[in-house]
Image (cartoon, helix red, strand yellow):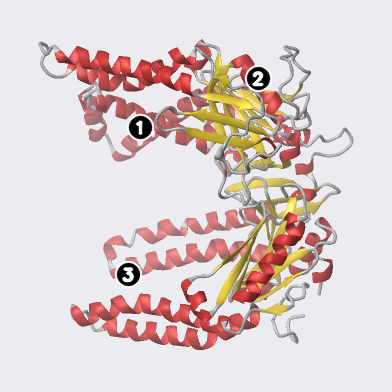
Amino acid sequence: MTVSAEPVGPTVDSGVPWRRLDARMVVVEPVRTLVKLVPVLVVVLITGSNGDPVRPWITLGIGVLVVLAGVVRWRTTRYRITAERVELHSGWLRRQRRSVPRDRIRTVDLTASPLHRAFRLSVVAVRAADAGGEHRNGGLTLDAVSTAEAETLRRELLDRRRAEPRPVEQPVEPDAEVLARLRWSWLRFAPLTFSSLAGVGAIAAAAFNVLNELGVSPTEVDGVDDAAERLAAAPLWLAVGLVGLALLVIAVVGSVVLFTERWWGYRLTREADGTLRVRRGLLTTRSLSVAEERLRGVGVHEPLLLRAGGGAQTRALSTGLGREAQGGVLQPPAPRAEAHRVAGAALRRTGSEIDPTLTPLVPHPAAARRRRYTRALVPVLVLVAAAVVVGRVWPGLSWIWPGTVVLVPLAALLAADRYRALGHALTPQYLVSRLGGLSRRTVALQRSGVIGWTVRQSPFQRRAGLVTLQAVTAAGEGGYRILDVDAADAVALADATTPGLLRRLLG
Amino acid sequence: MQTGSTVPTALPLRPPAHRVDPRARSWWRLRGLGGTGIVALPQLVVALVLGGPGWLWGTLAATVVAGLVYAAVVPGILFRIHRWEVTDEAVYTLSGWLVREWRIAPISRVQTVDTEHGPLQQLLGLASVTVTTASARGPVTIRGLATAHAQELARQLTETTQATPGDAT
């Protein structure tokens, strides 16, 4: 049988019957659209004169159109899974045909919003990677099928060993090994992550928007204006302190709420077919899977705040999982030891080995330490000098430079911390490296996952005899740097990691 | 280790075997002059039309001098440094001027091979060959090859890599 290699091509009739999305979508789709349209409908209904007889009809008309659109979408959308491809045809006036080769499928993720959950439906997102990693095919989304069907699809599409067309539905739940579960004590890490803080900002902005849409100015709410006046009358330090405290409380509460929504019911399991699977979510439930043959390693991330609190977060380095913020996250922020344990468990560490991300690392040469200090201190000293000059020229601003002097010890501390992080090691299976101060990461990359090398050397590095070695890989960020390593050691490390590749290039 | 070879290197890797086409020097020179023009022209226009401040003539002169010095000196250095090689195992390039970059892509992991001719390169009969692996950070580009040579190289590489099964991730 020949199958067109084009992503959108003529259908080859392989005899596999076409299937529809779940019939309950006829209800879900219009409800979802109507919820989005509520503000518009409210405006149409409420604003304007009350006696206008047209307005209710407009509203009704919109409603009917939305329902019709939902029915048409359900009627015209069909999908099927053949031995080689997943195909999705959709659209009525504008036909869309998507087809993804099954051996290109990277992840199959299930998501269920509260609305979907009410009808026991799940959205199946099939993501496929294309060559080069930049022009990705994107895959396709089945929105939505029944949760049971979604589960079957997930198992079927991720299992490359079972390539024959779909078997008879087996309700037997295969044994899954639980690698990690949520512990509520981890809630203490929630305020320490930047993504949570950013989420809080988003929520605040959304709340402000809603108030704005409703025509309520925050200053008109009883008490707010009053409080603002009192604050303005208070001494500056008190006002700043109070506002800061209020923001802190909001951030902490908000991040705890977000953490709960995101990680409720978190479970990391290894399914019977070897897939790593993360299940989580309070309102919107998610199931994210990483096929084991796509796994190229793990990373343990420690942003400064989280690190200060003794926490870390583990990510899977998997081909096809892009650089998006949540890509490959295997675990909520957790105690450091737990994060390393999960990293090891994800890589199938056996009892006697140590977790790959805890491998003792070779420190980098003293020149690397000097470079950390110069790179941290020079910009700060330039800033101080500029502030001093500003103070000389405009005496009114001479109070600035003592403030900038405070940055000098901070920069020195950061440099020392960054140097302490630097290290690399080669184990029989993994290339382990660590770097970063504000955002520290330890990465264990499978040696077989290294698909190239980049060596960079700036004039300063040349003088110090250092290079930055980058192991190129198809997974995660696409490349992992080993910063400021001795030039000879870098080549030796690369040669040992990928035996044979550099054989004829050694000088 | 640091001296003796035509390319100064502090790395215990030998430099790749082949130089790029000598016409690449003209390409780099033209690019440098073009860049200088882009920076210098607005200054000239402002100085002439708007009668800008006197120091503008100073910066303009500095820009032109810097551009000319670059065009005179740097292409030669780039030509000495830029090298490439295809072995049985890997595509290997060395590029850069101040910041040197060595790139190694295993032949077995190559996914696509593209040739590219920019307008300036076409004018000079040059082309670039880009070898892409499954990583977004992995592409290895050989710039400044003679067009016919680039096409022949791309054809050879495509043949070699098509013989490799799997999706090379």
Q: Earlier in the sequence, mark 2 or mark 1?
A: 2
Q: Quadrant of the N terminus of chain A?
A: top right
Residue on which disc 3 sits:
A392
Question: Residue A26: horizontal and vertical position, in percent?
Answer: 45, 14
Q: Element under label 2? A: helix
Three-letter amino acid code at the position of disc 3: Arg
How far across and how far down the image is residue A487, in percent?
Answer: 74, 68
Which numbered disc, 2 or 3, marks the residue that appears first in the sequence? 2
Labelled pair 2, 3 in contact (Cβ < 8 Å): no
Q: Nearer the viewer, mark 2 or mark 1?
A: 2
Which of label 2 and label 3 is nearer to you?
A: 2
Q: Residue furthest right?
A: A352
The picture places residue B153, in percent across and down from the top left corner, at 68, 70
Crowding at mark 1 (Cα within 10 Å: few <14, some 14-19, many 20+): few
Q: Amino acid at mark 2?
A: Glu
Whether residue A74 can be seen here? yes
Q: Nearer the viewer, residue A8 or A273?
A: A8
What chain is tagged by disc 3?
A
Q: Mark 3 or mark 1: which comes first in sequence?
A: 1
- The circle drawn on residue A205 is 1
Judge depth for marks 3 and 1 and give the one in front.
1
Q: Relative to residue B73, is residue A282 depicted above or below?
A: above
When asked about the image quadrant of residue A129, the answer is top right
Q: CA distance from mark 2 to mark 1?
A: 36 Å
Residue A334 in picture, x, y percent from top left: 65, 31
Q: Which residue is mark 2?
A: A151
